[in-house]
């Protein structure tokens, strides 16, 4: 019997060095895409998938991520007093049910695998989702699509996309078995292989559904690429123990951990908005000369 998935872990302890100086005094996950911070997109996506419990794996100086989901009594009282109904409605998604969000500290930056291990008490014996807020997927909930696949196959399911062969050394890459064009069997995983050593060009993005079987391998805290505890290595060791699949998800992914990807997300998410779309299309025309330039 496949156990229902109701938990999500969000690793948010990174330093955000690619966005300095902005991230000197604020978590990168609080950077807004249009008018919502990255962390909100991740929580919204998880809630759309039916996930009810959340664990933020944070670091020093990141308490504002927890505060963001708290009740802002003074702000809400002021908005009510002034009749700012639309502003109050905009605040609503930043609220979570009491007791549904917890936070744990990752004291040292020892990799994604270590961050997930820090959430071991929250995970317990339950299946769980992982969402990396740096990745935003526009369209139907990506983690929701993984949950649908998990409900059919059980085991581990990861979101995958094709990358240029010369970029395999940037990602976790799948060694694939059977492939129906959407769901692929995972025979192996390699963390950041050189292009000549890559078993495919199918890369994992920042969306995972995992069973608790992975935790016994993370608990060993074995170092891998970059001298960090790699989640990819621990997942690879579960192959053969539990079903393992990659899902070619529907939607467009924006890597908001990269400046160009972050800027593209601003355009993509604003251009479809009723309140912004026409203005964005109008000002983009002013920059056409630069787009046509060599």
Image (spheres, rainbow, N blue to C red):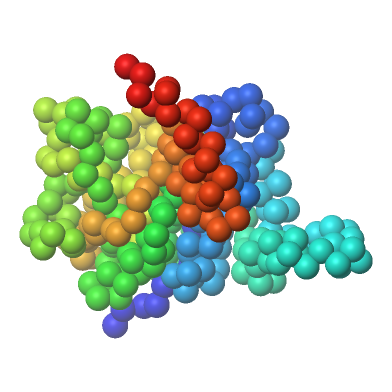
Number of disc labels: 0
Q: Is residue 280 visible?
A: yes
Q: Residue 286 in the image: x percent, y percent? A: 50, 30
Q: Residue 183 in the image: x percent, y percent? A: 18, 62
- Residue furthest to the top in view is 294
Q: Residue 240 in the image: x percent, y percent? A: 17, 60
Q: Residue 102 in the image: x percent, y percent? A: 62, 60
Residue at 49% over, 49% down: 271
Quadrant occupied by the C terminus: top left
Instruction: In this rendered view, identify the residue nearer to me: 14 or 271.
Output: 271
- Residue furthest to the left in view is 178
Instruction: In this rendered view, identify the residue nearer to me: 50 or 6.
Output: 50
| 57 is higher (above) or lower (below) than 183 | above
Residue at 33% over, 64% down: 146
Residue at 47% over, 34% down: 285
* Residue 173 occupies quadrant: top left
Instruction: In this rendered view, identify the residue nearer to me: 293 or 107.
Output: 293
Tell me: 112 left or right of 84. left
Quadrant occupied by the N terminus: bottom left
Q: Is residue 73 visible?
A: no
């Amino acid at each position: 019997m496949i156990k229902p998935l109701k938990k999500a872990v969000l690793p948010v302890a990174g330093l955000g060095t690619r966005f300095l100086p902005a991230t000197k005094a604020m978590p990168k996950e609080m950077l807004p895409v249009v008018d919502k911070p990255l962390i909100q997109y991740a929580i919204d996506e998880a809630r759309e998938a039916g996930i009810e419990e959340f664990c933020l794996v944070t670091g020093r100086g990141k308490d504002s991520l927890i505060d963001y989901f708290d009740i802002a009594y003074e702000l809400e009282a002021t908005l009510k007093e002034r009749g700012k109904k639309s502003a109050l409605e905009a605040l609503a998604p930043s609220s979570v049910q009491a007791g549904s969000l917890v936070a744990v500290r990752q004291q040292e930056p020892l990799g994604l695998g270590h961050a997930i291990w820090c959430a071991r008490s929250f995970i317990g014996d339950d299946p769980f989702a992982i969402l990396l807020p740096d990745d935003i997927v526009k369209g139907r909930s990506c983690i929701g699509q993984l949950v649908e696949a998990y409900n059919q196959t059980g085991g581990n399911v990861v979101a995958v996309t094709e990358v240029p062969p010369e970029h395999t050394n940037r990602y976790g890459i799948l060694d694939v078995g059977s492939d129906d064009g959407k769901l692929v069997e995972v025979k192996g995983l390699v963390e950041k292989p050189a292009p000549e050593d890559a078993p495919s060009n199918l890369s994992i993005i920042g969306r995972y559904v995992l069973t608790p079987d992975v935790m016994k391998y993370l608990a060993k805290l074995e170092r891998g690429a970059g001298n960090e505890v790699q989640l990819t290595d621990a997942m690879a060791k579960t192959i053969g123990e539990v079903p393992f699949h990659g899902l070619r998800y529907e939607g467009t992914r924006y890597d908001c951990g990269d400046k160009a990807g972050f800027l593209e997300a601003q355009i993509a998410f604003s251009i479809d908005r009723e309140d912004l779309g026409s203005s964005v299309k109008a000002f983009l025309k002013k920059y056409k000369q630069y787009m046509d330039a060599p």
